[in-house]
Image (cartoon, grey):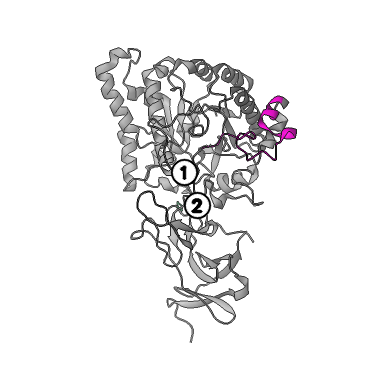
Amino acid sequence: MAIVDPQVPVDRETVTDIIDCDVHPYLNSLEELTPYMDESIQRLMNIGRFEKKMLKNMNAGAFDFPKSRYNNPNYVLRLDAVTPDGGVPGSDPEFLTQDLFDRFHTKYGILNVGHGSMSAYHNVDMAISYSSACNDWLYDTWVESDPRYKMTMVVPTLDPTATVREIERVGQKSGIVGINLQNVNIPLGNRFFWPVYQIAEEYGLPIVLHPDAEGSGEYAPTQSVGPASTYTEWHTTLSLVAQRQIMSLVCEGVLEKFPKLKFVFVEYGFAWLPSVMWRLDKNWKGLRDEIPWVKMLPSDYIRRNIRLGTQPMEESFHPKDIVSLVQMAKAEDMLVFASDYPHWDGEYSPKVFAAFPDDMKRKIFYDNASQAYRL
Amino acid sequence: MSTPLLAPVMVRVCPVDELPPGRRLLIEADRLQIVITNVDGRLYAFRNVCPHQGAPLMCGPITGTMVASVPHQYEYGCDNEIVRCPLHGWEFHMATGKSVAQRDTVSIKTYPVETNEEHILIQLPRQPESFAVHTAR
Ligand code: FES
């Protein structure tokens, strides 16, 4: 007999539809990618007929998918989302629509791969091939299965030319609504990325950043001050990555050069936003001649071009404090709802927004994302 | 004489052998959902709803924890005495309902359970109008 889940009814008076900007699909195994991947790369990844059973766990014995070095000592995926067949949470497209979309009244759920990108991996040729295979698999298996599914495409971040090629290859498909760029150890403002920004703006696709490469691939940043010792420390410092990247985007003039391009930072929280805005504005007033291409207040650029996923929402001492904070930063148009299903740090229900006024909720749940993504 | 509606009552849950060690059941008494577990012969009953955001504790692992210690010393304890929320991982002592991290301010409601010769019984705050027992999936 099935467990009777305590249903959390959505408050129908204030909430209409939801766009969920962070839903994670999982591969059960890398083997699922073999139909989409050239034999030579299958050989390098030891999948398909090139599996290396005996040496799998030996040091340097076989290909190891670049996973985070930081493991959650408990359960990184929520155990109440195990599929009816006992499968990995997030591995069954049909069950996910019932367990999440039906419960939240989700109109669109934007898929960001849960099993990981290879964007910061040292062998860029493998990352190129993996990215294409992963995009094709996700489109065929998930996006085609239900009209509510949309996806961001993964790219080989360390090769902007190959990234542009991949965007040209699949970026016009209707279910693809953003580019999952990933953090590598080149700041986002750097002109290395500008060809990618150019095509993204042209295609109307936002650049999406989501934790994944941080701490997995060899080219990933170590959160400004060196490696953290524990998962707790690592996870909490993720917000610093977004702050650092936003400063880079403003100071390098990216937001001036690509005025229509949106950058969506998902899963970095948002309570730090006033500090970033106020600090940049203050410095700009005295130092603007060093970055004369920054023509407006940095906070105005941030408000126009940057979007932030709500999750993991900082839990203020009093529920209303976080609302005041959004108002202080004038960030009502910047926040987009993200459930992060089936991760351990996602929201159980839209009710966590109970303290937010209705017009703000409408923007967060729907309007802001519908404008930021190519939906 | 019928039982007064607001007095605590002992309600029969199931025969003893329907809840062997390592298993758990979900009770629905009116709109109240209660998890009842058998951990190595010890019975615990607690509300199914996590006080943080409401996730079902029925799906949470039963585990131990690292007890509070001095920096850089790990000490595992309370083995199989803790239920951990399946979502964000808040921990609760099953015997007292108290949260491990916020013991003075956060807790889950627990319910007395006992067995007679044949049955498991739970004490509820009042006589429920409907009562059902479900097994885990
Ligand atoms: S819902 Fe249980 S810890 Fe958040």
Q: Are marks 2 and 1 on the same chain?
A: yes
Chain letter of disc 1 in the image: A
Asked whether the viewer can see residue A173, the reply is no
Mark 2 / mark 1, whichever is N-terminal: 2
Q: Residue at x 32, y 38 (%)?
A: A325
Residue B69 makes an appearance in the image: yes
A166 or A130, nearer to the observer = A130
Residue B48: percent from left, percent from top: 49, 61
The image position of residue B62, as x and y in percent, is: 52, 60
Residue highlighted by disc 1: A15
Q: Is residue A84 magenta-colored?
A: no
Identified by mark 2, the residue type is Pro
> Pointer 2 indicates a residue of which chain?
A
Which numbered marker is on residue A328? none
Q: Main secondary structure of the magenta part?
A: loop
The crowding category of the residue bearing disc 2, from other C-alpha atoms within 10 Å (few below 14, some 14 to 19, many at least 20), is few
Location of residue B100 in the rendering, given as x and y in whole percent from the top left corner: 40, 58
Q: CA distance from mark 2 to mark 1?
A: 11 Å
Residue A61: quadrant of the picture: top right
From the viewer's perspective, tell me whether residue A53 is left or right of residue A101: right
Q: Which residue is mark 2?
A: A9
